[in-house]
Amino acid sequence: MNSYLIEIATSDFITTQAAVEGGADRIELCANLSEGGTTPSFGQLKKCREAFQVPIYPIIRPRGGDFLYTIAEFEIMLHDVRLCREIGYDGIVIGLLNADGTIDMKLTGKLVEAAYPLGVTFHRAFDRCRDPFQAMEQLISIGCERILTSGQQPGAPEGVEQIARLNEAAAERIIIMPGSGVRKDNIKMLAEKTGCVEFHSSLRGKTKSKMEFIHPAFAASAESFTNNYIDPAEVKALRDSLIQ
């Protein structure tokens, strides 16, 4: 039987704590998941590394939006990669493209080199590239260990056939990890149809704030009185659905 791995994307210390409690094998640590994830603060990075023993891969992304970065933004990413290495993280998550939809091999290679010996996941910038099979070969050549992909569709269930083709072409030279829309009701299907053994999910939810005072001017503002939430039981249910 395959040995499966569940990676959970978290947005802060509390959701990371919940994901670990639920049995996540690895964490993708982010800020601003509503924007697709940006680099966590230094304080967040330091506290999470001190508190949790599971492998954690922070995302290195200086802003939301596209994956075409200026030199100044690349230099920010380079500083953050070095910081993650110094703090003792297990790996990083990156994704950089050229304007023509190809992988930015020059800058990506520099980040992979700066991260060594940390592992490197190339995130769903991959799903926006022009030729995923050429991109995969390029990422293999510079030492990335993993590609997070939804098969160039909005969600992994829609991209399942492309994910399967990528996983077959990868031939165990790089890990293909389905992500986006991975839930307990489809994860087993994804495993069976793709042959993949690592899966990524955010299981994002919201919980009501424990604030007792709610200013009437902001009573209708969900942002003001709800927090990001992960239910540990949902993490466990994701794995249980996979191994049934």
Image (cartoon, rainbow, N blue to C red):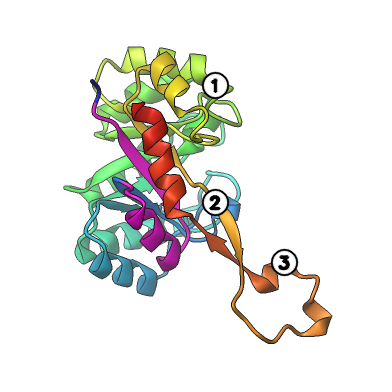
Q: Position of residue 156 (x, y in %)?
A: 52, 28
Dot 2, crowdedness within 10 Å: few (<14), some or many (≥20)?
A: some
Q: Disc 2 versus disc 3: distance between alpha carbons?
A: 15 Å
* Mark 3–mark 1 distance (CA, rounded to whole Å): 32 Å
Q: Are marks 2 and 3 in contact (CB under 8 Å)?
A: no
- Identified at 32% across, 33% down, the residue is 146
Residue at x 45%, y 57% (from the top left corner): 30
Any part of residue 94 in sight:
no
Label 1 vs 2, first from the N-terminus: 1
Distance Cα–Cα, label 1 vs label 2: 21 Å
* Residue 170: image location, x then y, percent: 31, 18
Q: Say which of marks 1 and 2 sits in front.
A: 2
Instruction: Place residue 16 in its image quadrant.
Output: bottom left
Question: Which residue is denoted by mark 3 in the rendering?
Answer: 222
Out of 153 and 142, give the one closest to the viewer.
153
According to the picture, the residue beneath numbered tag 2 turns out to be: 204
Residue 214 sits inside the magenta stretch: no
* Magenta part of the chain: 3-24
Q: Which quarter of the figure is the N terminus placed in? A: top left
Name the residue type under label 2: Arg
User: Where does the C terminus fall, quadrant-wise?
Assistant: top left
**Res 159 label:** 1
